[in-house]
Amino acid sequence: MTSISDLASMADGEPDDSIDENTLGVQDRPATAKKGRFRRPTVRSSRSKLLEEHAGSLGTGLLGVGAMFVCIMLSLPSLGRFVQLWPAYPVPAAAVAAWILFALLLVGVGLVIRHHDDRLPDRMFITYLAGLAVVIGLDLWAVWGRGIAESVTAAVAAGVGLVAVVAVRSAREIWAGAAVVGAVLLAADVATGIGSPDSLVPTVATLAMACAPAFLAALVVRAFRRMVTMELDRVLVQSTVSAPRYAVGMLASEELARLDLAAEQLLEGVASGATALPLEQKYAQRAASLATELRLHLIEGRRETWLHHAITESEVLGRRVTLTDPGTLAGLLDPRQRDGLFSAIWMLAGEAGTKASAQKRTLQVTLGPVAVAQSSAILHKMLVPITIETTGVARGRVDPATWDAVRRVGKHTDSMRDGSLRIDIECVADNPADS
């Protein structure tokens, strides 16, 4: 968002044709701008950006060091074979150059990752892949005319070299690189005319040594990333449990701080005389936009509860859980009941055996309508019915900890219909009218 002070730095005679997006997702356009399509930023994109910015602090640094160590250790057997087959190489100088280049590439990529805070930019990654391609080409040139599967060494190490960047690049990129290495080695083996049944075992063994480490390492790191991201998502969203009945979410709080700064800068400019009165049209439009955003934030804060923010600001719950709470009754629950309800929803929606089953798992959470609890004149309580309807969740697969969390919310009954689970909870909460 462009603040008021940023507008002051613009030339008075130059119209501002840029499009600024405010904190509510509404695009502010000058009067001369053409109409276009509006785009609202999603909470998911903001959360993904947050995780990307702090990727270096999620344990990937130590993971990258371990990957580099594994890469070096897996390359040592190929180096030993190179020393053993040295006298039989048709072009030994090319093989030596391949190994020297491979060593330089490992050192260089390690320094680049360290310099960029456990990240490898796209340009550097492409350069690294090009270097590995040169290593493979030199090694194939050195052993051309002999059995490729029995003679290549640096080319196998180049496939293993993908393990060194497995912690800083996506699994798909690593898998694609390993597949290309395997295809090149297989094509070279067939092209030399040595692809006979007798050489099948050496060919398969060479392809496995070149490709399997990168495939397996990428699979392990992908599972680790998914686990860390999921746990981090729960920790961040868990903080909403302690929020007041009506409150703004974590991301909205940041936007309110930006709005406050922009409004403060505008008022300070008016008070100091730097901004002349009456305000120019561009300043007046910006002030009106700030006022509208502040009013809408205040309105949203009076109709969105902690449970609404917990669901909408979560990568996991946002895709699978639908909340119906027209009376904002979730804000009446005490901390113990909130924690139990959130834990139950998380375990029902977030835990799944496979990715396919997780995508089919959805929840519909409904709160209300309210009812007066028995002996309300004495206890000053009210009954908040909570219904959790699921799809793709079998009762036998529900974790026992889920039922413990549900019991913290209140008495419950469960039933099955068409293979889906339905949980009805009678939650007794304090009546705000008696407080």
Image: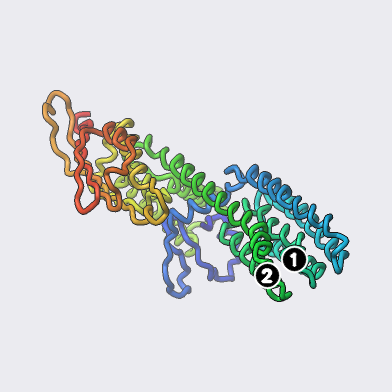
Please tell me how crowded label 2 is: few (under 14), some (14-19), or many (20+) other residues with Cα within 10 Å: some
Viewer-closest of 70 and 425: 70
Tag 2: residue type? Val
- State the image coordinates of residue 3 (x, y, percent, origin top left): 53, 55
Viewer-closest of 77 and 255: 77
Q: Is 367 situated left or right of 291 in this image?
A: left
Which residue is disc 2 drawn over? 184
- Confirm or deny contact between disc 1 and disc 2 (CB under 8 A): yes
Say the numbered circle drawn on residue 305.
Answer: none
- State the image coordinates of residue 377 (x, y, percent, origin top left): 12, 26
Point 32% across, 51% down: residue:
321
Viewer-closest of 421 and 272: 421
Can residue 321 be seen? Answer: yes
Mark 2, secondary structure of its residue: helix
Quarter of the C terminus within the rendering: top left
- State the image coordinates of residue 249 (x, y, percent, origin top left): 40, 45
Point 19% across, 44% down: residue:
415
- State the image coordinates of residue 127 (x, y, percent, origin top left): 72, 64
Q: Is 252 situated left or right of 204 in this image?
A: left
Q: Is residue 396 above or below residue 295?
A: above
Q: Is residue 190 above or below residue 332?
A: below
Please tell me how crowded label 1 is: few (under 14), some (14-19), or many (20+) other residues with Cα within 10 Å: many
Tag 1: residue type? Ile
Q: Residue furthest front?
A: 198
Q: Is residue 312 above or below residue 33?
A: above
Q: Is residue 427 above or below residue 328?
A: above
Point 28% across, 53% down: residue:
391
- Work out whether mark 1 precedes mark 2 in sequence or the reverse, and give the earlier one: 1
Point 17% across, 33% down: residue:
382
Say the numbered circle drawn on residue 136.
Answer: 1
Mark 1, secondary structure of its residue: helix
Q: How is the image coloured?
A: rainbow
